[in-house]
Image (cartoon, coloured by chain):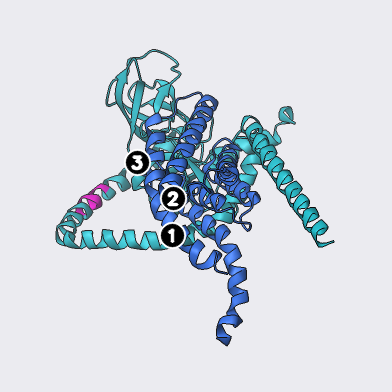
Chain colours: A cyan, B blue
């Protein structure tokens, strides 16, 4: 009786093992099929991504805290040696900035009076939301950051993300409290830009290296090394004129390569550009009878 | 003596959670660690491979799928790619029959290196073809090299956990 039950148990275990094996193989095949179906810009995937980012970010924040503290401590020790020199530099800078501020105040008054004169109306009020970078993507295949601000703070998809006034990326998925931003260097990033000097319009396309490419030119104005690349404002997600980088090299092999002003490895805090452009376009789509 | 027995049941429950918890911590750590020359290792592959070899009952393939799911959404890559990679390495580790013959560290290190190299190259091919633009192959190789360099450290930590807690209780 005992022998029978042990042999039956053995059989059952074998069947269980086989079923498990078949299940894993099926799931592997299923995930392989998913790769070709599940595009990252799909609405369901984008929304789920927001939820996952929201759930995972507190864990990332907790684990990153000791690493952040150690990094800050090392930085503080390094900075401590240069306090005197930095203090002098800062004093000089403050006096220069005061002069500039006075000049800008005068310019603002002049600008306002000129606006009144020509009945100028602004095409979008931009304001910034400062936030901290909590984590980054877990592999080298994407260039993205998780930031400590979400829908609750007014963050929306495609809003621009700035560091020191330079564009570094765009919001890609939004959770309630956290969001994921795509850096301009990511292979999925495509930003409408223009060359400041010639007004030549192009797209800044990421390639998962530190240096994105310029592509799709409207006309063939000659571009030079050192030309400043700024946002063009096309598409309405980003206002025009935000500096991104300079043309670093031009060659037939690798095309036009842009050197961003901000190196992504130095990014700790960012500013989300909350622009009424996005809201304006969304309102237009929502209220336009043709889009219904 | 009485004290030891008192906590044994608790340790037994906790020890069953160690494979999942350790893998989860390593997964979260991968989002925190800074990249080196744009390359970042998918270090969660190490615990998946390790617990797969150990054939730990408390570390089922559902957890591996969950980790792949999280990695996919946190990275924003093509959905399903990490689930596929993670499940594949788990399957390779769990159903291989070579480790009982040679269970040395050097052998597992070599097997892990080879398996991850093949899978990362496959990931590179899939993502490159999906995004049309070519992803820098040097970064992929560097990511793999970092992963391989990290392996002994994580292996040592996981082995300690396995011997001192998981197997004991």
Dot 2: chain letter: B
Residue at image x 35%, y 17%? A253
Are discs 3 and 1 both within one chain?
Answer: no
Are discs 2 and 3 both within one chain?
Answer: no
Q: Is residue A77 magenta?
A: no
SS for dot 3: helix
SS for dot 2: loop
In front of the other: B133 or B112: B112
Instruction: Tell me where residue B111 appears, x and y as whole percent.
Output: 46, 41
In front of the other: A135 or A138: A138
Q: Which contiguous range is marked in magenta? A: A95-100
Q: Residue furthest top?
A: A220
Picture disc at residue A110:
3
Q: Is residue B103 left or right of residue A53?
A: left
- The quarter of the picture where the N terminus of chain B appears is bottom right
CA distance for labels 2 and 3? 78 Å
Residue on which the image places disc 1: B157
In front of the other: B94 or B125: B94
Residues at marks 2 and 3 touching, judged by CB atoms closer than 8 Å: no
Crowd class of label 3 (few under 14; some 14 to 19; many from 20; radius 10 Å): few
Q: Looking at the rendering, which quadrant does residue A283 occupy?
A: top right
Q: Is residue A111 left or right of residue B101?
A: left
Instruction: Tell me where residue A61 appears, x and y as whole percent.
Output: 48, 59
**Residue A108 can be seen, yes or no:** yes
Q: Is residue A98 magenta?
A: yes
Q: Is residue A83 left or right of residue B84?
A: left
Residue A86, placed above or below residue A261: below
Picture disc at residue B104:
2
In front of the other: A18 or A49: A18
């Amino acid at each position: 009786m005992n022998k029978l039950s042990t042999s039956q148990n053995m059989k059952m275990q074998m069947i269980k093992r086989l079923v498990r094996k078949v299940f894993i193989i099926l799931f592997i095949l299923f995930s392989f099929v998913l790769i070709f179906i599940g595009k990252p810009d799909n609405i369901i995937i984008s929304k789920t991504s927001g939820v996952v980012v929201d759930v995972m970010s507190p864990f990332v924040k907790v684990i990153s805290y000791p690493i952040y503290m150690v990094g800050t401590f090392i930085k503080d020790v390094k900075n401590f040696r240069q306090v005197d020199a930095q203090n002098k530099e800062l004093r000089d800078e403050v006096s220069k900035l005061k002069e500039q501020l006075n000049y800008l105040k005068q310019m603002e008054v002049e600008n306002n009076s000129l606006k009144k004169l020509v009945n100028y109306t602004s095409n979008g009020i931009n304001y910034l939301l400062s936030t901290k970078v909590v984590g980054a993507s877990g592999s080298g295949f994407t260039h993205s950051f998780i930031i400590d601000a979400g829908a609750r703070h007014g963050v929306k998809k495609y809003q621009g993300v700035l560091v020191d006034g330079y564009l570094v990326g765009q919001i890609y998925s939004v959770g309630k409290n956290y969001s994921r931003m795509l850096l301009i260097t990511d292979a999925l990033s495509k930003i409408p830009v223009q060359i400041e000097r010639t007004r030549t319009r192009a797209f800044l396309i990421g390639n998962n290296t530190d240096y994105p490419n310029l592509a799709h030119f409207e006309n063939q104005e000659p571009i030079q090394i050192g030309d400043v690349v700024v946002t063009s404002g096309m598409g309405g997600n980003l206002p025009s004129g935000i500096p991104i980088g300079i043309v670093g090299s031009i060659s037939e092999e690798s095309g036009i390569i842009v050197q961003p002003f901000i190196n992504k490895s130095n990014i700790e805090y960012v500013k989300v550009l909350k622009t009424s452009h996005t809201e304006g376009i969304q309102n237009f789509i929502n209220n336009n009878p043709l889009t219904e | 003596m009485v004290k030891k027995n008192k906590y044994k049941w608790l340790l037994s429950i906790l020890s069953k959670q160690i494979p999942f918890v350790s893998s989860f911590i390593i997964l979260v750590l991968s989002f925190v660690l800074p990249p080196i020359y744009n390359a970042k290792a998918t270090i969660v592959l190490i615990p998946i491979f390790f617990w797969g070899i150990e054939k730990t009952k408390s570390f089922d393939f559902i957890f591996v799928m969950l980790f792949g799911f999280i990695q996919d959404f946190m990275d924003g890559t093509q959905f399903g790619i990490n689930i596929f990679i993670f499940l594949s390495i788990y399957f390779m580790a769990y159903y291989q029959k070579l480790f009982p013959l040679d269970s040395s560290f050097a052998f597992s290190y070599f097997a892990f290196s080879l398996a991850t190299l093949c899978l990362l190259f496959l990931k590179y091919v899939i993502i490159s073809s999906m995004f049309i633009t070519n992803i820098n192959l040097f970064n992929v190789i560097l990511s793999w090299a970092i992963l391989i360099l990290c392996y002994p450290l994580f292996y040592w930590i996981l082995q300690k956990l396995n011997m001192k807690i998981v197997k004991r209780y």
